[in-house]
Amino acid sequence: MIWHSGGWVRSAPSVAKPLKQTAAPTPDRAAKRELWLTRAWRRRADGASTLYAGDFRILVSFTGRSWSYNIETVKGEPASWSKSGFASLPDAKMATFDKITRLQRASA
């Protein structure tokens, strides 16, 4: 018996319930975008940066006057490339994040 606010109550034998499996909350787009530059970008000898993200391989490289990017699927199919240059490496990397989220939204 257990004490309840109204008096003593006969309780049922306690049976441990299994914990409910819940998916971990996914960060929203703004939070993911904020972490994009901290991901494990690999730097090549020529100065280009490469990142594998989901189903995409991203290459950001310096093309003489500006930074540009090339995005392809892991299967090697071209997905997108930049038509205009970017002033800095972080600007080009952030543009790849924006482009990939647009590609994922379009395929969903």
Image: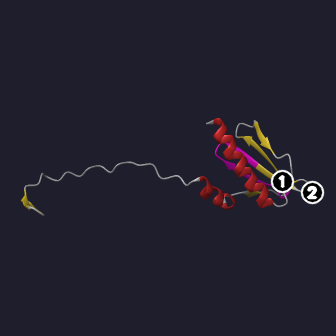
Which quarter of the rendered picture does the N terminus lie within? Answer: bottom left
Q: What residue is at 80 percent from the left and 60 percent from the top?
A: 89
- Give the residue type at disc 2: Arg
Which quarter of the rendered picture does the C terminus lie within? Answer: top right
Looking at the image, is 68 positioned above or below residue 35?
A: above
Displayed quadrant of residue 90: bottom right
State whether the magenta stretch is mostly helix, strand or loop.
strand
Q: What residue is at 83 percent from the left and 58 percent from the top?
A: 47
Looking at the image, is 31 positioned above or below residue 70?
A: below
Q: Mark 2 points at which residue?
A: 65
The span shown in magenta is 46-58
Colour scheme shown: secondary structure
Q: 59 or 103: nearer the eye? A: 103
Check if residue 42 falls in the magenta segment: no
Q: Mark 1 points at which residue?
A: 61
Q: In this view, does 25 lie to the left or right of 45?
A: left
Q: Farthest residue in the right direction?
A: 64
